[in-house]
Image: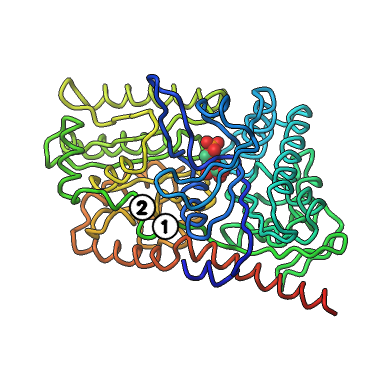
Amino acid sequence: QNLLREALPGAEVLIVSNREPYIHNRSDGGVVVQTPASGLVSALEPVIRACGGTWIAHGSGDADRETVDERDRIAVPPEAPAYSLRRIWISEEEQDGYYYGLANEGLWPLCHIAFVRPVFREADWRAYEKINERFAEAVAREAQTDDPIVLVQDYHFALAPRMIRERLPKATIIAFWHIPWPNAETFGICPWKERIIEGLLGCTILGFHTRFHCNNFFETVDRFVESRIDREHGTVTLGGHETFVRAYPISIDWPPKALAAQPSVEECRLQTRRSLGLASDVMLAVGIERFDYTKGILDRMKAVDLLLTLDPSLKGRFVFVQAAAPTRSRLPTYSRLQSEAQELAREINARHGDESYRPIRLVIRHHEPAEVFGLFRAADLCIVSSLHDGMNLVAKEFVASRDDEQGVLVLSSFTGASREMAEALIVNPYNIQEMAEAIGMALRIPANEQRERMRLMRQRVRERNVYRWAGQMLIDAARSRQQRRILDIA
Ligand code: G6P
């Protein structure tokens, strides 16, 4: 936290993201505040709480729209205001094009290797351009100085860095791409590849989770845009403007806020088992995320199925809980996944269970952070089997939740997190046999070995927490601001 304050004393900080940190919805005559299931939000919220500033995001709840004007700032978090939230309202038609269309049917499957074909439509692209422009205008309107630090988040805003640069030439613009960046051949599928690259190269610093994604980006720029690339120093120069490209592995708050009010691990174990109607000694595996096809949810259910076939002695003694938050459900790929998972859970439960035993519990609803942490603490193991994932913060949150130093993490090798968490049981989620064996093994790891593995992972996540992620970017930003001042004086 100190790193943040030291890096940029007095600078004005603005965040631009699609997802807002608090969603206000009407419910039973009142208003409920929801914390969205989003890795981006869980990482950035503690950062802006610590350094203050303004967060500009799409207003997605139904409770504020009629009462809050786009120009109104709201002080958040409600219980202890630390920064301002400025919402941008987007029409349903614009949302269809910009968010569902270009961002989630185009760029999301383009950047994740999950073998879902990206869809690109001209009308979606136009909506995407328009919304990026609207957010860039909001940044210019909101900025109180001519050289703010603007943190532009994710694939929803690839064009915004250049648009902001045109309005605020002296701004320090840091763009962070929260999802993987594919190789040049794959990115070449995108009809607007040059525009996206040029848009991103409007920023001062462009961050990815891993070195590997940075290399893919360099390769893509090299293939499609006339520019000067200096791989040694990690820079790309386009039209006289230099962008610094670097890996900043994202992380979580340590200790996470949601941990503070948790009962003891023993209490969580008992409460969770009681609420699921399970005996206190039943072994529990959990999976918790958005219902997204990149997360490998079907694959891990198949692994549980195979495990119960390979080791029938686990029947009645082992249960897998999949908590999945509905997400982007208007898109057919997402709604189909939900019905497929429900069908598969029914099949597996019929195959291995009876009236008193259901090995798979699929809970499709939003879970607030306190509930998520309660589940993590109750579990014997957590399965993160993403087919492809930039980082995956669920893996880090699971480890952070286990202050008892127990519990095993089964982790896909296709997550950025697997590079930092070698003590997890690393699996290939496409290999169901391997995953089933890993889950079986996780259930047999003795307490002392669990402790050794967990201790090392916890130590690493604690050290490489989200303040370090943001602090490192801000230190690089401070360096670039200093260089610019020297050049201005000269
Ligand atoms: C990923 C993306 C985030 C996004 C989150 C939730 O983590 O990188 O930008 O907020 O998914 O998705 P949603 O579409 O609900 O915002």
158 to 243, vertically: above or below: above
For label 2, count other residues whose C-alpha is less than 10 Å away and answer few (under 14), some (14-19) or many (20+): few
Whole-angstrom CA distance, mark 2 to mark 1, is 7 Å
Q: Secondary structure at mark 2?
A: helix
Instruction: Name the quarter where the C terminus is drawn.
Output: bottom right
In the rendering, at what x and y percent does residue 163 appear? 78, 48
Residue at the spot 63% in from the left edge and 59% down from the top edge = 12
- Depth check, front residue: 427 or 51: 51
Residue under circle 2?
A: 257
For label 1, count other residues whose C-alpha is less than 10 Å away and answer few (under 14), some (14-19) or many (20+): many
In the rendering, at what x and y percent does residue 266 appear? 15, 49
Q: Which mark is residue 367?
A: none
164 to 236, vertically: above or below: above
Asked which quadrant contains residue 98, the reply is top right
Residue at the spot 18% in from the left edge and 59% down from the top edge = 447
Q: Disc 1 marks which amino acid?
A: Asp
Q: How is the image coloured?
A: rainbow
Q: Secondary structure at mark 1?
A: loop
Residue at the spot 59% in from the left edge and 69% down from the top edge = 9
| Label 2–label 1 contact, CB within 8 A | yes
Q: Which mark is residue 253?
A: 1
Q: Is mark 1 within 8 Å of ligand 1?
A: no
- Depth check, front residue: 18 or 365: 18
176 to 456, vertically: above or below: above
Q: Quadrant of ligand 1?
A: top right
